[in-house]
Image: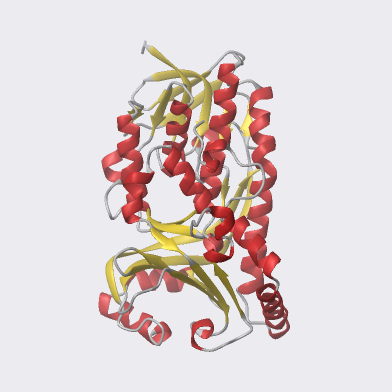
Amino acid sequence: MAETERYDIIIAGAGLAGASFALAAAQGGLKVVLVDPQPFSAQLAPSFDGRSTAIAFSTFRMLDALGLGETLRPHACRMDHILVTDGRRPGAASKSPSPAFLRFDAEEIGGRTGGEPLGYMVENRRIRAALAEAVTAAGIEVRAPASVVSVERDAGKATVTLADGSILTAALVVGAEGRGSIVRRAAGIETVGWAYGQSGVVATVRLGRDHGNVAHEYFLPSGPFAILPLTDQRASLVWTETTRRAEALRDASDAAFQSHLMRRFGAFLDGVSVEGPRFVYPLSLSLAEKLVAPRLALIGDAAHGVHPVAGQGLNMGLKDAAALAEILAEAARLGEDLGAETVLERYARWRRFDNAALAAGFDAFVRLFSNDIGPVRLMRDLGMAAVNRIGPLRRAFMQEAGGATGDLPRLLRGEPV
């Protein structure tokens, strides 16, 4: 019979949310183990994840507090301005004064954030590399490649069996392995959601001129098109199309893709050249009906997968990780059982409303903007023009997007767990 190994917390999933939670929990004095079917080396390959992420300024404080800031800062591009445009073609906000756009400037809230930008754009591969380095330095045990076969829970512990026959026990199991979470399924937690029939085509491009730390998002009838600034005069393109068109764009030759890109966005993307592979990610909404069950908690995409329209998916997951780590560290200091329902319900209460409200808001935003119905377009354009003219409302939007509102976990205030 395989020997049983004991931990405080078993974390299924060593991706961005899982590894961040492991660092936070270890900072709080807890013994954790990360389990992931992918070896760390595979997750660091440039072809593993072609996306870039908008890290809210409060979330970057968390990464700083976890010891990642110094490693990430050279690869993090400030977003000092965000231009959101509604129209059949991109470029309206920058080419001519139009009421159908929103402009957000970091200096408007600079006094409240200490001069921080609205956020930072960082390539996911850079975040993964920084996390791997920090997890290794912290001495956190990583079992990868290793697959969770079963999760059993009783009054005293949770038992996880791996594909190689290893048996791990802990007070708590955390599901952080994405939308297809095995841990969530083992607890019988259902999800609600739907596919959008859209996919995001993601590519990195080198620009013909400096981007000025401006992020552009255009709402076109087929879906949003974002040009997000990266370091070294590059940008991440997120081009939303129907899934069929998106897959055709991914599979097109380099010359054909460049031709499609320039024909549709050429006036704005003057002198652009595509660098590296193209990726396609189907877009959908998935929301777990519960965040916790006896001896089990969910974070990140295992708890909520949202449309990337506002770039908040990872920020939501890292806020989950910060909140859960803080609650568990406090429970451990008080001598409480980490897997007790009374402890886990504190986490659920903290994060339940925020996650559901944001998911619903992003869904409504996508449905409002991904169409070309005349009366709807008129109403949303009037709304955008109104927000642009009301300073306090505009600043409130920026504070919300920066993750600086509500009851923030210590890590998002830049404090250790």
Q: Nearer the viewer, residue 387 or 361?
A: 387
Relative height, residue 172 to residue 43 (above, below): above
Location of residue 66 in the rendering, given as x and y in whole percent from the top left corner: 42, 37
Position of the N terminus, as image quadrant, is: top left
Residue 233 vertical placement versus 11 (above, below): below
Q: Quadrant of residue 138?
A: top left
Q: Find residue 352 and report its image quarter.
A: top right
Please name the colour scheme applied to the rendered image. secondary structure
Percent across and percent down for residue 130 are: 33, 43
The one nearer the camera, 204 or 121, is 121
Q: Quadrant of residue 312?
A: bottom right
Residue 130, placed above or below residue 259:
above
**Image coords of residue 100 (percent x, y):** 62, 81
Seen at 67% across and 80% down, the residue is: 381
Give residue 74's position: percent from left, percent from top.
31, 54
Q: Nearer the viewer, residue 159 or 66?
A: 66
Residue at (68% x, 72% y) in the render: 387
Q: How many marks?
A: 0
28 in relation to 395, above or below: above
User: Does any portion of residue 238 appear in the rendered image?
Assistant: no
Question: Is residue 359 in sight in this rendering?
Answer: yes
The residue shown at (67%, 64%) is 364
